[in-house]
Image: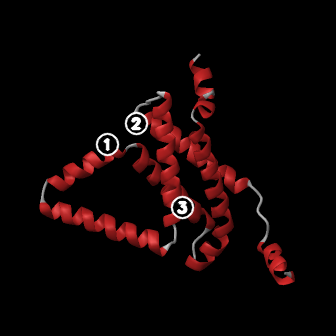
């Protein structure tokens, strides 16, 4: 019976399906922007996808284990004022430059919102997995959604350009 409960999880928690669909859209969007991004920044496609998956994994870790993660950061910051300043500046400057320079703030916020809603849906149906299991489940859903999104076809840009010219 535990396998049946696990298989019925997307039906009982529909926001888990929404999380998968959001990851599919993000994967398809990444597939569309990847040629322009790699030519602009001079990186290979493999590095681009490594960065996309690492970004998604950081968002998943931050959204599924906030109590454990923030407790460790708080303990580090409580050790001294210097550590508080260093950690704050490191997070704000590095995160701000990354999010604003690469124009990924919207993608990160959408993914984080859907992850938090999926966690709330789990709580609503009474499923409270351990943080490690929840991290593994959410990572599996997000990464498989991104992978599925890369497999979806997308229309070439020339079709959009032809439609704009004839209009």
Residue for badge 3: 107
Q: Are marks 1 and 2 in contact (CB under 8 Å)?
A: yes
The quadrant in which the C terminus is found is bottom right
Is the image coloured rainbow, by chain, by secondary structure, or in one colour? secondary structure
Using the image, tell me which numbered label, if any, was put on residue 131.
Answer: 2
Real-space CA distance between mark 1 and mark 2, rounded to the nearest whole angstrom: 9 Å
Image location of residue 129, percent across then percent down: 44, 30
Local crowd size for mark 2, using a 10 Å CA cut-off: few (<14), some (14–19), many (≥20): some
Q: Nearer the viewer, mark 3 or mark 2?
A: 3
The quadrant in which the N terminus is found is top right
Q: Secondary structure at mark 2?
A: helix
**Residue 13 quadrant:** top right
Q: Disc 3 or 2, which lies upstream in sequence? A: 3
Taking depth in this image into account, of 112 and 141 the one nearest to the observer is 112
Judged from this view, the residue extending furthest toward the right is 166
Say above or below: 99 vs 113: below
Q: Disc 1 or 2, which lies upstream in sequence? A: 1
Residue at screen point 60% across, 69% down:
44
Residue for badge 1: 68
Image location of residue 135, percent across then percent down: 46, 40
Local crowd size for mark 1, using a 10 Å CA cut-off: few (<14), some (14–19), many (≥20): few
């Amino acid at each position: 019976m535990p396998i049946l409960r696990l298989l019925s999880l997307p039906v009982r928690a529909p926001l888990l399906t929404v999380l998968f669909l959001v990851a599919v859209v993000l994967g398809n969007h990444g597939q569309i922007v990847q040629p322009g991004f790699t030519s602009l920044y001079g990186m290979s496609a493999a590095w681009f996808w490594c960065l996309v998956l690492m970004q998604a994994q950081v968002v998943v870790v931050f959204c599924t284990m906030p109590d454990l993660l923030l407790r460790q950061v708080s303990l580090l910051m409580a050790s001294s004022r210097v550590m508080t300043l260093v950690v704050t500046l490191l997070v704000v400057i590095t995160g701000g430059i990354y999010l604003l320079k690469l124009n990924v703030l919207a993608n990160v916020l959408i993914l984080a919102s859907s992850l938090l809603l999926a966690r709330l849906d789990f709580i609503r149906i009474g499923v409270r997995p351990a943080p490690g299991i929840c991290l593994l489940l959410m990572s599996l859903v997000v990464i498989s959604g991104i992978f599925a999104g890369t497999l979806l076809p997308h229309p070439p840009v020339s079709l959009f350009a032809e439609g704009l010219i004839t209009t």
